[in-house]
Amino acid sequence: MMPEEWPIAAFAVDGTASARFAGRDRLSTVRRDFFLDPAKRLSEQERALMTAMLHCLVGDVADAVRAALPGGGVAANDDGNAALIATLMASGLLDEPGLMALLLRRADEERISTAARARSGRREARVLQGLVSHDYGAVAAAAMALILGNGRRRDRFGQCLIAYDDLSVASAEALVHSVSAALRSELAANRGYAAADAELAEAGDRVLEQRDEERGIDSLTAALVVFLDEAGGLTDELILAAANDGEIAFVAEVLARRAGISTESALDELLSGDAKYFMALLRSAGMSRGVSAGLLAGIGDLLGIDDVGDAIARFDQLTDEEAEKARSWLTTDAAYRAALERLGQGRG
């Protein structure tokens, strides 16, 4: 769906808006919202997409926990999942940093891929499809696995989804245990709290054991990049074609592999909207000036970089020593970097 087709901010058909809370009870929330940086706030489209992905993911996990209970535990239904999600949202239990970061990243990737394909007039990413017929069997198999993985992350309307296997260990544990806790009262009504606690703990463990990191979309993307590298197939032409297809996760994986940093760090720099960080990443990854200029021309504006001339000038001005310092910074743990940012020290 193109963003303009989402009637998110439209009024009701009868012209009346839904009732809103009034008065000072909402003042603390309004103050935080009012002074947020407009450039960093979620758009209505981003909010709608992230909400839809979160609801589907929580519903899937809730169904999995219910299914893992003895005798099926409690029956799954849409109304029950909607009430469970509302409870978890109100409690703040879904505000888990890793989960929210993944939702935002997926929203960014979806925005970029949708815009890139709209420019080219293509509905599908041709680069990945072309790799299915690669001479190296491992590449062909990995490309097919990634295409199928991407397909499983779309609902019947083409809406972007997040799969349980895409979660990190920490996010999966937090989500499964939160969902289990929210199901406690429902189960305890029939079995008592002691029995409910024991059964939910066991069911949660079973669901956590089902998570397969290798089925996660990041692992599938990484496998394809590894096999392409082995086959000598990570050409400049392929990287630029993937970027123009909107395959930002693939591009980030290539840059991460060449720079010797984590994919998460590469994505942070790519999606930072800051030319100096983007250019430093490209230099750290050993990208040529031609490829860097091609990336800027193709998707620079979609990454928040509008002044291509200034960006390529930054690329030219970066010394090898500065590029190595940037790479060294990105090899440190993300939690360490975040802590330094909170302390106001930044990159040094």
Image: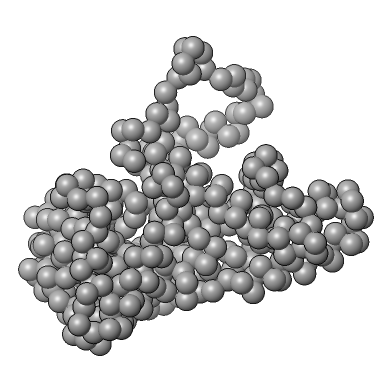
Quarter-wise, where is residue 66 in the image? Answer: bottom right
Name the residue: 70% across, 43% down.
Answer: 80
Residue 318 visible to the viewer: no
Name the residue: 21% across, 65% down.
Answer: 127
- Compared to residue 25, the image places residue 305 above or below, namely below
- Compared to residue 23, the image places residue 200 above or below, namely below
- Compared to residue 339, the image places residue 192 above or below, namely above
Residue 328 percent across, percent down from the top left: 33, 79
Indicate left or right for 320 with 80 as reference.
left
Name the residue: 51% across, 74% down.
Answer: 213
Residue 70 visible to the viewer: yes
**Most distant residue in the bottom direction:** 230
Indicate left or right for 59 with 118 as reference.
right
Indicate left or right for 133 with 77 as reference.
left
Position of the C terminus by quadrant: bottom left
Residue 171 percent across, percent down from the top left: 58, 64
